[in-house]
Amino acid sequence: MQHRNPELITDQAHDPDDHGHFDRWSASYERSPMQWLLFDRVHHGVLARIPASYKPTAILDMGCGTGRLLRRMQSRWPDAQLVGADVAEGMVAQARAQTPNARIEHAPAERLPLANGAVDLVTSTASFHHWSDQAQGVREAARVLRPGGLFVLADMALAFHGKPLAARQVKALFEAAGLTVRSQTSPVPFFVFTVGLKA
């Protein structure tokens, strides 16, 4: 397996039709068997890695899709401000319709329309391997986090599309962005869950 410097990852392997694929999928996304087969398990794993004592007041979900994880987090933290960002217009439209209490932004992970230190929890599930510049996306997550904030990233370590990264590569990106990696686990097969802390 070829070893790549995570800082040199470009969008050479990026699928230019990724956005179109997710736009087409958005109308039926909530009914997809992938929800209960995989995505719900990944969401559960993300929430299980956030300490019970942690009480975020503002949350961002990067690559939020239709807002499914945001709605779960609203149930756990009903007073938190919720923000979602997704690059697919269809997913954004569905998220806005189905998650009315959240602010949903049409934006890529690499250019988040949020101020520095705007949130104290960032999550991302199964979208990281689609980002065109993964290093920049992680830097953006770190930028919008407040000191003491957490970034919980769950993504495929193996996939036939996009740019899945090994755990060590994800860890290197977190550390380069100034995040301390608190844990890396694989509670769901073929996924790596990375928890980073902003000092």
Image (cartoon, rainbow, N blue to C red):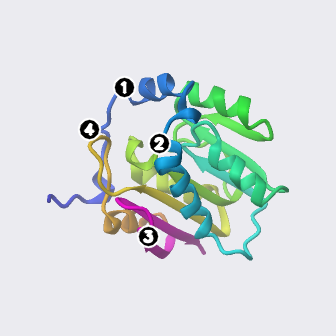
Tell me if residue 175 is in the magenta stretch.
no
Q: Earlier in the sequence, mark 1 or mark 2?
A: 1
Q: Tell me how far mark 2 sits from mark 3, CA to CA.
A: 32 Å
Judged from the image, the secondary structure of the residue bearing numbered disc 3 is helix
**Mark 2 packing: few (<14 Cα in 10 Å), some, or many (20+)?**
few
Q: Earlier in the sequence, mark 4 or mark 2?
A: 4
Give the residues drawn in magenta, as a range. 178-199
Q: Earlier in the sequence, mark 2 or mark 3?
A: 2
Which quadrant of the view contains residue 2? bottom left
Q: Tell me how far mark 4 sits from mark 2, CA to CA.
A: 28 Å
- Residue corresponding to mark 2: 34
Judged from the image, the secondary structure of the residue bearing numbered disc 2 is helix
Residue in the image at 54% along x and 43% along y: 63
Q: Which x, y percent locates residue 136?
A: 45, 50
Amino acid type, callout 2: Met
- Residue corresponding to mark 1: 17
Q: Which mark's residue is nearer the viewer, 4 or 2? A: 2
The numbered disc on residue 175 is: 3
Q: Tell me if I can see residue 140 in this picture.
A: no
- Residue corresponding to mark 4: 12
Q: Earlier in the sequence, mark 3 or mark 1?
A: 1
